[in-house]
Image (cartoon, rainbow, N blue to C red):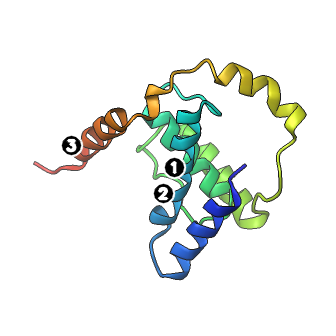
Amino acid sequence: MPEKETVERAEEDLREGKSPTTAAGEFVREENDHVREGKHGARSPKQAIAIGLSKARRAGIPLEPPKRGKTSEDTRHKAEKDYERGQSEPQTGEENSARSRVPRKALKKEPKSTASHAALSQQAKSAARKRKSG
């Protein structure tokens, strides 16, 4: 469940005419903060980014699912479902604390270095290298 401030910042980005990916960046930032705090677990920086993008889609940010061939078919299908859900009924409100307690305990055991400055920098550099033509 995204925080209220995150949704507001993302909506402000969209009102200012910024792209949906910029608005979705607010959710990725929030997810990285949660991993650092131990609220969530992620095994890699890519996973933390993917969780943030999924949250953005479910919150109603008009972020298109990835094109065929860019990711696995399962990932693309999940992104499509999140996008449709967010466009029809954006996620709002609070999560059920009783239901989230057990998974949160398990997720706290995951590494926090996943969202470290160095790990995110390395991920950004490798992604840029893949985009580079030539």
Tell me which amino acid carries mark 2.
Gly
Tell me which amino acid carries mark 1.
Val
Q: Which numbered marker is on residue 25?
A: 2
All told, the count of numbered labels is 3
- Graded by Cα atoms within 10 Å as few (under 14), some (14 to 19) or many (20 or more), the crowding at tag 2 reads some
Residue 120 in picture, x, y percent from top left? 36, 39
> Which residue matches tag 1?
28
Determine contact: label 2, label 3, CB under 8 Å: no
Residue at 25%, 47% in the rendered image: 128
Furthest toward the front, the residue is 37
Determine contact: label 1, label 3, CB under 8 Å: no
Where, by quadrant of the figure, is residue 61 drawn?
A: bottom right
Nearer the observer, 10 or 72: 10
Residue 94 in picture, x, y percent from top left? 83, 51
| 82 sits left or right of 124 in the view | right
Nearer the observer, 90 or 99: 99
The alpha-carbon separation of the residues under discs 1 and 3 comes to 21 Å
Tell me which amino acid carries mark 3.
Arg
Residue at 54%, 38% in the rendered image: 73
Determine contact: label 1, label 2, CB under 8 Å: yes
Nearer the observer, 11 or 126: 11
Looking at the image, residue 102 lies above or below residue 50: above
Q: Secondary structure at mark 1?
A: helix
Q: Secondary structure at mark 3?
A: helix
The alpha-carbon separation of the residues under discs 1 and 2 comes to 5 Å
- Graded by Cα atoms within 10 Å as few (under 14), some (14 to 19) or many (20 or more), the crowding at tag 3 reads few
Q: Which numbered marker is on residue 129?
A: 3
**Which numbered disc flags the more N-terminal residue, 2 or 3?**
2
The alpha-carbon separation of the residues under discs 2 and 3 comes to 20 Å
Residue 22 in picture, x, y percent from top left? 45, 64
Pair 1/3: label in front: 1
**Which numbered disc flags the more N-terminal residue, 1 or 3?**
1
